[in-house]
Image (cartoon, rainbow, N blue to C red):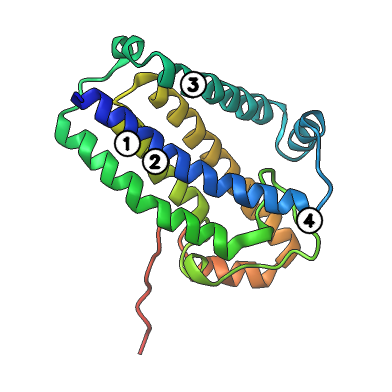
Amino acid sequence: MNEDMIFLVLFFIIVFIGTGIRRYYSYKIEKNSQRLSVRERVVEMIHAEGRIFAVLYFASSAYLLILLPLYLLFPSSFLLFQMPFPIWLRWFGVGLGFLSIPFLLWVHYVLDEEWSITLKFQTDHKLVTSGPYRRIRHPMYTALIVYELSWVLVSAGFLFFVYYVITVLLMIVRIPKEERMMLEKYGEEYRSYMKRTGRLLPHFRRENG
């Protein structure tokens, strides 16, 4: 088995485990609430986050759904789009992928049914401040940024890099909207929470005195 085939296998193992975690929690939420059709989900996202965001989000999702099976079935064709990463960087991506999966699972486990694909509150929504949320306000995005970066590094694929750039930009656009929404609902409680946490990475303040 050559190196490209080894990285292909490792890539799909990382993708399968991480997307399996997200699919499990998505199914868990849908099972306990009203299941929305694709059209209803699009309308919901347009209402919450705007038409441009919704179009980019669903277009990037469709792009990935097409890209993954093509990469699996015709990996040699993707060599045309392969970036000249050194082998050590691709192995670093493998380590990054497997290390980010437990963090992704932890975030989902703690957030559980408070999670939503779109910006909305679940029924009886609670402000989660435990686990990874104790020092980071958006650990889900942190986990995904690292996890999906591993896809780019392991595959060395420019086409996956395009997907990664779009998804990171969507997260950057979404975070301020999400924080405004949380401030409207939780007010001073969330404002206080913001002061003691970082957005994507923890920050530690020295106590005075």
Q: Residue at x 70, y 68 (%)?
A: 126
Could you say which quadrant of the image residue 179 lies in?
bottom right
Identified by mark 3, the residue type is: Pro
User: Percent from the top left, x then y, of residue 2?
Assistant: 19, 23
Q: Crowding at label 2, few (<14), some or many (≥20) Cα neighbours within 10 Å?
A: many
| Distance from Cα at disc 2 to Cα at disc 3 | 15 Å
Q: Residue at x 66, y 47 (%)?
A: 26
Label 1 secondary element: helix
Q: Which mark is residue 22?
A: none
**Mark closest to the chain's N terminus, 1 or 3:** 1
Residue 146 showing in the rendered view: yes
Label 2 secondary element: helix
Q: Residue at x 20, y 35 (%)?
A: 89
Q: Which residue occupies the foreground of this view, 83 or 198?
A: 83
Could you say which quadrant of the image residue 88 lies in?
top left
Q: Residue at x 19, y 26 (%)?
A: 3
Identified by mark 4, the residue type is: Asn
**Mark closest to the chain's N terminus, 4 or 1:** 1
Identified by mark 2, the residue type is: Ile
| Distance from Cα at disc 1 to Cα at disc 3 | 15 Å
Q: Which mark is residue 10?
A: 1
Against 152, residue 74 (above or below) is above
Identified by mark 1, the residue type is: Leu
User: Percent from the top left, x then y, of residue 164?
Assistant: 44, 31
Which residue position holds label 2?
14
Which residue position holds label 4?
32
Label 3 secondary element: helix
| Image position of 165 (left or right of 97) | right
User: Percent from the top left, x then y, of residue 204?
Assistant: 37, 71
Which residue position holds label 3?
69
Could you say which quadrant of the image residue 37 lies in?
top right
Task: Look at the image and tell me in which quarter the C terminus lies.
Answer: bottom left
